[in-house]
Image (tube, rainbow, N blue to C red):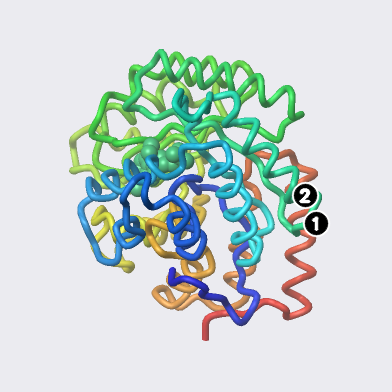
Amino acid sequence: MRAGRTKPNKWLTAQELHAHLNTSFSMSFLEELVSQTQDEHGISVNDLHLTESQPLDQGFAIFSKLHKIFRTEESIYLLTRSVIKEFAEDNVKYLELRSTPKEIPETGLTRDVYMQTMVRAVHDCEKEGLDITVRLLVSIDRRHGVEIAKIAVDLAERWMKSTKGLVLGIDFSGDPKVGDATDFIPVFLDAAERGLKLALHLEEIPLHEETKNVLRACCGHCTIRIGHGTYLHRYEPNEGHEEIEDLVVKWKIPVEACVTSNLLSKTVDRPGTHHFWYWRSKQHPVILCTDGKGVFGCLLSDEYSKVAKEFSLGREYLVNYALSTFDTIFECDEVKQRLKDNLKQFSEKEQIAFPS
Ligand code: 6MZ
């Protein structure tokens, strides 16, 4: 996404369910912030987004640099506000924003202050009257291990209660090459027991054993969505991993599909082979998401546009698709219905633009 880039029309987007706060900056926001603080970290904004396909590891190297920039309460507040505003400008009506709460003694940031800051930013956007409903997920970084994950669940539960559901779940993410998701199963079950919903990164790279273990243990006990799920269905015949797809289908677990992110991270080779279409063809819930619109340089409307062109999807198909995705949000039926009604009205008034 180039600095200052704007869209002339209101594009169809509906909702964003897989956006990591620290990777969802816009370049214009980042340029301004970095110009104010450059001396402190010596990082150039050009090093903070992928312009061409690179292995997934390169993305994780960028995330570490970003964590050197977003280190203060003030920067987290400004980032959260600007990310919400930018999604609203892209016509996103419902956003579940996720982030890993950080503990940085030098700047006085604690996990609790981090959460408080994000919540404050959401409330300030509400007061400003932005036409977007925002909910928050607390991220567990798998690199940090099970003990920190337990702290994240306690934090999420506390903030879920004190915000009356503005915080509504847990995200499980981080470098998939590190650790084993199996170790976190008790944490996931405990989180679900406490009323938290689960968005779990699974199969961003082929990791069939941990996925099978997690799904076997959690299906039926937890409300789950799967982040990426790129290799969910890409098992070799007769390896016994068909069970994974069977569980995903049986429990109708929605898949968060991040097309541009997967292409730039080289986990998918071209748009035509993206699993978005595999799951759509099975009429299984799959939701277009940006992942990190700053690092991957994509708006959510770009993702809609990309699949519409690739799979020749017309106006009616896209509207029906967008409406169906509201069923996968972690909110209650009343909120789902309100979002659907609004989008229906909006699309009937022809205020939404479509790829030609
Ligand atoms: C796995 C990812 C990710 O939490 O500091 N993250 N985890 N796969 C991905 N695919 C590209 N993209 C982002 O946002 C940054 C953190 O989100 C996770 C990583 O843990 C990263 O450090 P927050 O706001």
Residue at (33, 67) in percent of width and height: 271
Q: Can residue 249 be seen in the rendering of this structure? A: no
Question: Which residue corresponds to mark 2?
Answer: 126
Residue 121, compared with residue 271, is above or below; it is above
Residue 352, compared with residue 30, is above or below; it is below
Residue 122 locus on image (x, y percent) = 69, 44
Q: 296 or 276: nearer the eye?
A: 296
- The local secondary structure at tag 1 comes to loop
Question: Which residue corresponds to mark 1?
Answer: 129
- Residue type of the residue flagged with mark 1: Gly
Can you tell which quarter of the image residue 269 is in?
Answer: bottom left
Residue at (60, 61) in percent of width and height: 86
Disc 2 versus disc 1: distance between alpha carbons? 5 Å
Residue 252, compared with residue 240, is above or below; it is below
Q: Give the left or right position of residue 347, taking residue 330 as reference.
A: right
Residue at (43, 32) in percent of width and height: 172
Residue 320, compared with residue 104, is above or below; it is below
Residue 300 locus on image (x, y percent) = 52, 63
- The local secondary structure at tag 2 comes to helix
- Residue type of the residue flagged with mark 2: Glu
Residue 310 locus on image (x, y percent) = 39, 74
Q: Give the left or right position of residue 150, taking residue 327 as reference.
A: left
- Quick one: which residue is furthest to the front in this view? 39
Q: Give the left or right position of residue 4, taking residue 295 as reference.
A: right
